[in-house]
């Protein structure tokens, strides 16, 4: 017998008005609800576990334990990229958990709608998931179920790719490794988790570590870049066989920068000892790739900016040479011309050289050349307007002596 789940429109615990179903599973549903006393939207996760029938008295205890484990795990975490829990408990045979409501879409939905993602976008998502896992790992918790449907994307302050990590129901404490062999099996003796994204150590029931979550996240990164799951097999057995095979995944076929490809390759190695061991190591690798990417655009930028600066300096020097005042001890140009014949030479301006043809390949360089030539032309006009015109040489008129009679000349000579 299974407890009956509430319907849309009901009020659960007289505090939560159920508005619509946003998710469901084998034994439960997730509702969008409104908390009446605070008038806020919440996500209400309600599970109706099967009761003890057919000599399976541990069913209810198993579901209750798993549900309590998720509540305990989330209550220890406060990273902004981890889902926040407001309340949890049991009511009339139903297990419930009140979580913050995220109005967004999962990565699974995003890939289905838009296909492969750009490497820059993938790195931004990975960094946020790694921040969430970093806090969980330091608290001694391994998520164990990283997959596209457990990563939510939503818009916040104009950023459409803010991340929330969901569903810590399979989270396991690193201190409980001795129980892995039994607790990782459901009542039907199937593996707990999603086979397509499980690590080899999970399949073999070996101890899990932070590298376990990094393996699953690496498979998710490849799927975001390619738009297809790494393992496309349809049956659980063939999928599991791919995980435990010694053949590594072929990451060389992924169309992404080499630095990012190397980081992902380090995340999805089959041997957990050869894998990247912590979220910090992956973040360091991603930061190194981003630093290389930021430096790359400077190469073409320098090729454009340097010629522009050179052309500007040439124009400035030409203008300053034509407008500079003459030196103090220099001989004026007019005085030098007085020793030559008084010939007025008309000023004939030197014709401008033809402008180079426009180059459609580099419009920025062409614009710089035009600006420089305009400046030179303006400088020449100012120089010709201020220059003095050459003055004609005036010849001094010689005065002819008067003709004086001989008798008067002597008198004038001896006059006092």
Image: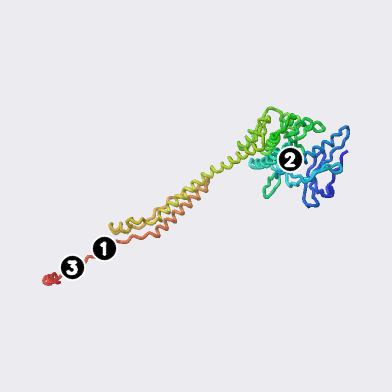
State which tag comes first along the sequence, 1 or 2: 2
Q: Secondary structure at mark 2?
A: helix
Nearer the observer, 168 or 161 = 168
**Of discs 1 and 2, which sits in the foreground?**
2
Q: Which residue is mark 1?
A: 395
Q: Position of residue 179 (x, y in %)?
A: 77, 31
Q: Residue 401's mark? A: 3
Residue that sits furthest to the left in the current view = 407
Q: Is residue 256 left or right of residue 327?
A: right
Q: Is residue 237 left or right of residue 3?
A: left
Q: Secondary structure at mark 1?
A: loop
**Can you tell which mark lies on residue 337?**
none
- Distance, label 1 to label 2, CA atoms, is 105 Å
What percent of the width, then of the height, locates residue 42?
77, 48
Q: Assess whether mark 2 and mark 3 are in contact (beta carbons under 8 angstroms).
A: no
Q: Secondary structure at mark 3?
A: loop
Say which label, 3 or 1, has the lower sequence index.
1
- Find residue 150 and name its label: 2
- Distance from disc 3 to disc 1, alpha carbons, whole Å, reads 19 Å
Q: Earlier in the sequence, mark 3 or mark 2?
A: 2
| Distance CA(mark 3)–CA(mark 2) | 123 Å
Query: Mark 2, residues whose alpha carbon is within 10 Å: few (<14), some, or many (≥20)?
Result: some
Q: Position of residue 56 (x, y in %)?
A: 86, 33
Quarter occupied by residue 232: top right
Q: Is residue 320 visible?
A: yes
Is residue 59 positioned above or below 311 on the image? above
**Camera-nearest residue between 411 and 369:** 411
- State which quadrant residue 85 falls in: top right
Q: How is the image coloured?
A: rainbow
Instruction: Assess disc 3: are there few (<14), some (14-19) or many (≥20) residues with their C-alpha within 10 Å of its C-alpha.
Output: few
């Amino acid at each position: 017998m299974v407890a009956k789940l509430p319907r849309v429109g009901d009020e659960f615990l007289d505090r939560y008005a159920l508005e619509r179903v946003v998710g469901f599973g084998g034994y439960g549903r997730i509702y969008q609800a409104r908390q009446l006393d605070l008038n806020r939207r919440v996500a209400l996760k309600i599970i109706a576990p099967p009761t003890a029938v057919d000599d399976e008295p541990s069913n209810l205890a198993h579901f209750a334990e798993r549900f309590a484990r998720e509540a305990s795990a989330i209550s220890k975490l406060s990273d902004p990229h981890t889902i926040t829990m407001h309340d949890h408990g049991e009511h009339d045979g139903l297990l419930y958990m009140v979580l913050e409501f995220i109005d967004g879409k999962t990565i699974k939905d995003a890939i289905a709608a838009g296909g492969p993602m750009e490497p820059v976008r993938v790195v931004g998502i990975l960094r946020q998931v790694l921040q969430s896992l970093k806090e969980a790992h330091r608290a001694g918790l391994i998520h164990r179920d990283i997959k596209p449907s457990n990563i939510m994307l939503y818009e916040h302050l104009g950023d459409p790719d803010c991340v929330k990590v969901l569903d810590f129901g399979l989270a396991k404490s690193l201190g409980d490794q001795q129980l892995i062999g039994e607790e990782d099996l459901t009542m039907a003796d199937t593996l707990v988790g999603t086979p397509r994204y499980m690590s080899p150590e999970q399949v073999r029931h070996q101890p899990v570590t932070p590298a376990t979550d990094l393996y699953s996240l690496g498979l998710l990164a490849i799927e975001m870049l390619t738009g297809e799951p790494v393992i496309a097999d349809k049956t659980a057995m063939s999928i599991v066989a791919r995980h435990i095979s010694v053949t590594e995944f072929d990451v060389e076929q992924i169309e992404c920068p080499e630095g990012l490809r190397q980081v992902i390759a380090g995340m999805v190695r089959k041997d957990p000892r050869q894998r990247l061991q912590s979220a910090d190591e992956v973040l360091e690798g991603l930061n190194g790739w981003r630093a290389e990417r930021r430096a790359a655009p400077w190469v073409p930028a320098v090729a454009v900016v340097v010629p522009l600066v050179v052309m500007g300096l040439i124009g400035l020097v030409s203008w300053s040479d034509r407008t500079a005042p003459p030196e103090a001890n220099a001989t004026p140009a007019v005085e030098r011309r007085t020793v030559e014949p008084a010939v007025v030479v008309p000023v004939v301006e030197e014709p401008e050289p033809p402008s180079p043809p426009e180059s459609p390949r580099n419009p920025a360089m062409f614009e710089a050349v035009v600006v420089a030539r305009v400046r030179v032309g303006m400088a020449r006009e100012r120089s010709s307007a201020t220059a003095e015109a050459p003055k004609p040489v005036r010849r001094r008129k010689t005065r002819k002596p008067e003709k004086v009679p001989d008798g008067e000349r002597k008198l004038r000579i001896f006059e006092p």
